[in-house]
Each structure stands twice: as C-alpha cells, then as structure tokens.
Amino acid sequence: MRRVVVDPEIPAEAANLFRHNGPRLSQIRAGWSPEPQPSAPRRSSRVLQFCGAISALFLVFLVFAGNVSQIFLFVPTLLIFVACVGVLAARDPLEIEMTEHDLYEQGHLYEGRYLLPEDFDHDADLLLDRVQQAIDFILRSRVNALGMLDDVRNSVMLPAQEWEIARLLTKLSALRTEHHDFTYGGSTPEVVAAMAPLERALAASEAAVTARVEALERYASHVAEADRALHAHDQIEQLRARLPRYEELLAESGADTFAVPEISRLSEDAGHLEQALRDSVRSAHEAFRHLDGPPAP
C-alpha cells in the first residue's frame, strides 16, 4: 500500500502519526470514531492501587528493619517490583486508546493536508509510486548520506516535491472521474465538441505532471550513477592500498621484470574513477536544480 502523503508544513509528530496509520485514517474519513475515553475515576483507581502497593511495601520494610540482615533481601525485591510496575505501565491499554483519539483529533484538524490511497485513480497511483520510489532511493543513497548532494536541501525539497505532485495527481484523478461519469452512456455531438477543450486540458495537465515525475527520476538516475562511481572508486582505492605488497612479492620472487603492466595502472584507474565520481555528482546537482523549474523572468 502507498504511504500517506503529508503536507510537509504540518508538525512532524502529526505527520508521523498519519504515515503510520493510513488504514485507520481511511476509516475515520468513512465515518469511524473511537470509543469514548476512559473516565477519570478509572485513572484514579489505578493510582490508588499503585499507592496502596507502595504503602504495603513500606510496611514490610519496617518489619524487616528490625533485622539488618534481611534488608539485603528486601532491596532486590523492591527493585524487581519497580521493574514489573514499569512493564505493566508500558503495556497500559489506555495508551493505545489515547493514540486512536489523538489520530482522530489530528485527522480532523489537518483534514485536506494529507492524502490517502483512495484519493488517486489507477494512473495517478502508478505515477505516485514512481515518485516515492525515486525519493526513497535518493534519500537512502550513500552519496546523500555522505553530504555530497546537499542532503539538508534534499530532506526539505524532496518531501515538498512529493506533496506538490501528489496534490496535483488527486485533482487530476477527481477530474478524470467526473469526466468519465459525465460521458458514461454516450453524449451528443454538440456535447462531445464542447468537452474537447476540457479533454485537452486534462491531457496537457497530465503531461506536465508526468514531466515533473520524469525529472525526479532523472535526478534519482544521476544519484544511482554517483553511487556506482563511489563504490567503484572505493574498491580501486582498496586495491591500490594493496599494491606495495604485490610489488614486494614480485621483487622478492625475481619476477618484477615480468610484472603485468595493468598493476601499475591502478593509480591511473583510481584517478579516472574519481573524475567519474565528480562528474556524476555534478550531473546530479544539475538534475536537482532542474527540479526547481525554470528561473523566474
């Protein structure tokens, strides 16, 4: 299932909540609501039970205090009890209920600023999948992790690109559905002629969005090439570090005059790969700038 696409301007806590609860958001949109929250007395009873347990332990401590040797047995017992209480508190079902209530409230608060799988028709869903795959690859690449691609700007710009493209795709999906429903069952020649400009508008808009997706994929392709160049460069550097050992072996065995010429070209190969890496990163930067669109006049 496609992940929920979230407006990058909303708070990170709400965005993460939405991304991890797509199916429940769909249910909320369809009319589902969580059970009422537990009443305050239930909370109070839990607190009273806990305080009662602590009081009982304190009384036990007073009994053991008369015998110093027993204190050493009491301390580990107390620590085990505290650990058990912590585990029980962590498994409190109240926290799960509160998460659903938070999701319900946040979902209504930010309605329209997150997009679910049902917001996209088949064609739009395919395009969105391409967008998300390209973005995921770029953000997980080695060259991005090493800061060779302006990783800070990537982390800001790419989610914005995903949101903007997804928003346009939902509009296209809705208009395509309306257009199909309107023409279902046939139309008169006059209506067909009147709708022709609308169909051309839909086609032009779809082509423009597809071009943005392809630009993002080109950027991902350049990043992949840079990753491959970086990997090859690292391997050649490892081989070059081993070169003195091979040269020493050849000299000691008396075979240095018959050394294969390719061995001595490792440094040259490393230089070529370093240049290829720089070229790949530069190409990725060019593709990145292309995502910003043409410069303002």
Image (tube, grey):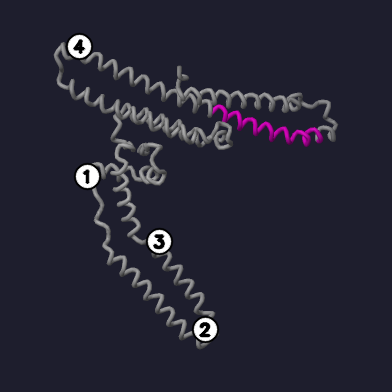
Amino acid at dot 4: Ala
Q: Earlier in the sequence, mark 1 or mark 2?
A: 1
Task: Classify mark 1: helix, strand or loop.
Answer: loop
Is 281 positioned to the left or the right of 247 in the image? Answer: left
Amino acid at dot 1: Gly
Nearest-to-viewer mark from 1 and 2: 1
Q: Earlier in the sequence, mark 3 or mark 1?
A: 1
Task: Classify mark 4: helix, strand or loop.
Answer: helix
Q: Which residue is rendered at x = 32% and y = 41% of the image?
A: 110
As measured in the structure, the alpha-carbon distance from the residue carrying label 4 to the one carrying label 3 is 65 Å
Q: Which residue is mark 2?
A: 70
Q: Earlier in the sequence, mark 1 or mark 4?
A: 1
Query: Residue 57 in the image: x percent, y percent?
Result: 43, 78
Q: Which residue is mark 3?
A: 90
Q: Is residue 209 magenta?
A: no
Mark 2 is surrounded, within 10 Å at the Cα level, by few (under 14), some (14 to 19) or many (20 or more) other residues, namely few
Mark 1 is surrounded, within 10 Å at the Cα level, by few (under 14), some (14 to 19) or many (20 or more) other residues, namely few
Q: Earlier in the sequence, mark 4 or mark 3?
A: 3
Query: Residue 208 in the image: x percent, y percent?
Result: 37, 20
Amino acid at dot 2: Gln
As measured in the structure, the alpha-carbon distance from the residue carrying label 2 to the one carrying label 4 is 96 Å
Q: Which mark is residue 193?
A: 4
Q: Which residue is mark 1?
A: 31
Q: Earlier in the sequence, mark 2 or mark 4?
A: 2
Q: Which mark is residue 48?
A: none
Task: Classify mark 3: helix, strand or loop.
Answer: helix
Where are the magenta residues, as a range? 224-248
Query: Residue 244 in the image: x percent, y percent?
Result: 78, 35
